[in-house]
Each structure stands twice: as structure tokens, then as C-alpha cells.
Image (cartoon, grey):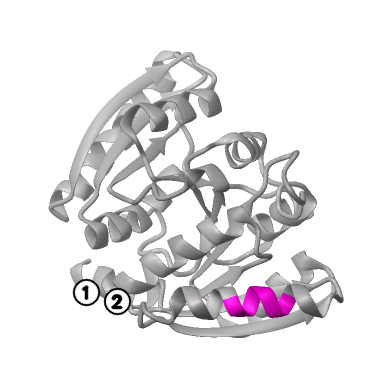
Amino acid sequence: MANKYKYFMKLAFNKILLAFDNSGASRVALQKACDIAGKFDSEITVLFVSSGKEQEFSDSKKFLEDFTSSKGINLSIVEKTGKVYDEVIKLEKAGDYGLILVGAHGKSGWQPLWMGSNAFKVISSSNCPVISSQEKAGEIGFDQIVLPITNSSNTRQKVPYCALIAKAFNSTVHILATSKSKSNDTVNHVNSYLRQTERYLAEKDIKYTSETKFAVKVPETCIEYAKQVGAGLMLIMTDTESSGIFMDSYSQQLVNHSPVPIMTIHSRDTRLAGKSGY
């Protein structure tokens, strides 16, 4: 297990894809990408999907180069025309990226480019994790991480990614065991997953806290808990329907409304260290 985990750590974020449109939210996503690249010695590819206005690309290119010039980041910039979702997914598949970052504008933002069909298609169709950040995330770091654990057989698959980031940033992981149900079966299942997660983090010498909340509205509870602990990241699993382009309702609510950056992970992610995350 130790060798598999080290291999996973080495490969997980070696190539990062950032979708950028020069909005405040995408600038926050850029900062997050640089923070991660600094820890994992990652290469960053910035994708700018052009609207046909040359000045937009020139302004964005200048900002990106100025921002990263003093950080020692290996950065390349790609300009494409077409549909945002198509270009992001094409580039991800062609480049075998380990992480995608996008700025989340919310439903009424400057340009609802990501929150809406493009965001959900990117998150649902990617093979690697996606971090979406609202502009209000600002300078919040990854010192505090929220890890929801639910009554899903896939819920633990995000734990290796959580451990990976927590180890790199010396973070405290706040495990939230939660469900809308409080039946005995549900409580027993979730608490069992909680104990396994605690053992996994303890074995990696990662600081953590634990909290249980049952018979609650899960998205709202996760967001409030993240605010309470001052989290800079929350990790969730997201399942897709047969069409492959729709996220489940919990994931949509969290991505749409969370002021805390959300990292969404697929059970089909072949980079995961073990079928159940352990």
C-alpha cells in the first residue's frame, strides 16, 4: 500500500489544466493552481477559449505571464475557439491531465460561463478531479479541508486525494459524517466509513477532526460546516447519469452555492489508489 500511495502522489498532479477567462473567479482558480503546482512541481496549461476578440486574449496572456513570472511556474497558454466544454474535455483527454481548475461564476456572475451547462459538463465528463472556485474564495488557503463522508459505497474513494493535498499543505482534515437519514442502518454504515477514514489519515500522520450530523440537508450542512471551520477546500464524489453529462443534485448544489472551493472526483478515476480508496 505504501508503494502504491507514493506512486499515486508522484503522478496525481504533475499536469494541471486551468480554464481561464480573466474573470475574478478564474484569477482565484489561477492562484489555487499555482499553489498546488508549487507543492507538486506541476506543469500548468492555461486554456483560453476565445470569443474572437483579440484584445481579450492579449490582456489575459499579459496578466498570466505577469502573475507567474516570479513564481517559477512552468506555464503554457493555449488559445482555442469553439465551445468551452468541448475544448476543455478535448485538451484533458489529449494531455492526460491530473487536475482541472475552473472559476465558478455562480448563476448571476459577470459571465455565467461555468455555472450552467459548461461547468457541469466539464465536471461530469472529465476523468480527473476538478476544482471549482468562486471569486469570494479569495486568498483562502488549503490549511483546513472538509471531507464529507456519506452513506455511499463510493464516498471513501476521495480520501486518497484528500490525504495527498493535506500532506502537501500540512492541513487539518475535518471529516463530516453526514446523511439526510438517521436510520440505524445508515448511521452504522456512515460511522463505519468514518472509522476507516480516521484510520487511513492517522496512518499517514495527517491531523483530523470528526463530526457527525444526521437527518440534515446535506449540501447546506456541508457548506455551513466548511464556513465554521474556515475551510479552503471541500472534496466530494460526483456520480453521472447514463448520458454522462449530469451531476447528481447534491454535487450541483455544492458547486453552485459553496463559497469554499469544491474538488469533485469520479469513481471512474483510474488514478485512485485502490478500488475503495484504501
Q: Residue at x 45, y 25 (%)?
A: 224
Amino acid marked by disc 2: Tyr
The residue nearer to you, when weighing 250 against 56, is: 56
Q: Dominant secondary structure of the magenta stretch? A: helix
**Is residue 175 rendered to the left or right of residue 134?**
left
Q: Residue at x 41, y 36 (%)?
A: 148
**Is residue 5 rendered to the left or right of residue 216?**
left
The residue nearer to you, when weighing 256 against 267, is: 256
Assign the N terminus to one quadrant of the image: bottom left
- The residue beneath circle 2 is 7
Q: Residue at x 79, y 54 (%)?
A: 243
Mark 1 vs mark 2, CA separation in Å: 6 Å
Reply above or below: 32 against 224.
below
Position of residue 261 measured from the top left corner of the image (x, y, whole percent): 49, 47
Q: Which residues are magenta?
A: 57-62
For residue 3, the mark is 1
Place residue 8 in its image quadrant: bottom left
For residue 106, the mark is none
**Is residue 121 rendered to the left or right of residue 189?**
right
Position of residue 223 measured from the top left corner of the image (x, y, whole percent): 48, 30
Amino acid marked by disc 1: Asn
User: Are the residues tagged 1 and 2 within 8 Å (C-beta)?
Assistant: yes
The residue nearer to you, when weighing 23 against 48, is: 23
Position of residue 71 measured from the top left corner of the image (x, y, whole percent): 36, 77
Reply above or below: 179 against 54.
above
- Helix, strand or loop status at disc 2: helix
Place residue 256 in its image quadrant: top right
- Helix, strand or loop status at disc 1: helix
The residue nearer to you, when weighing 89 against 230, is: 230
Magenta includes 61? yes
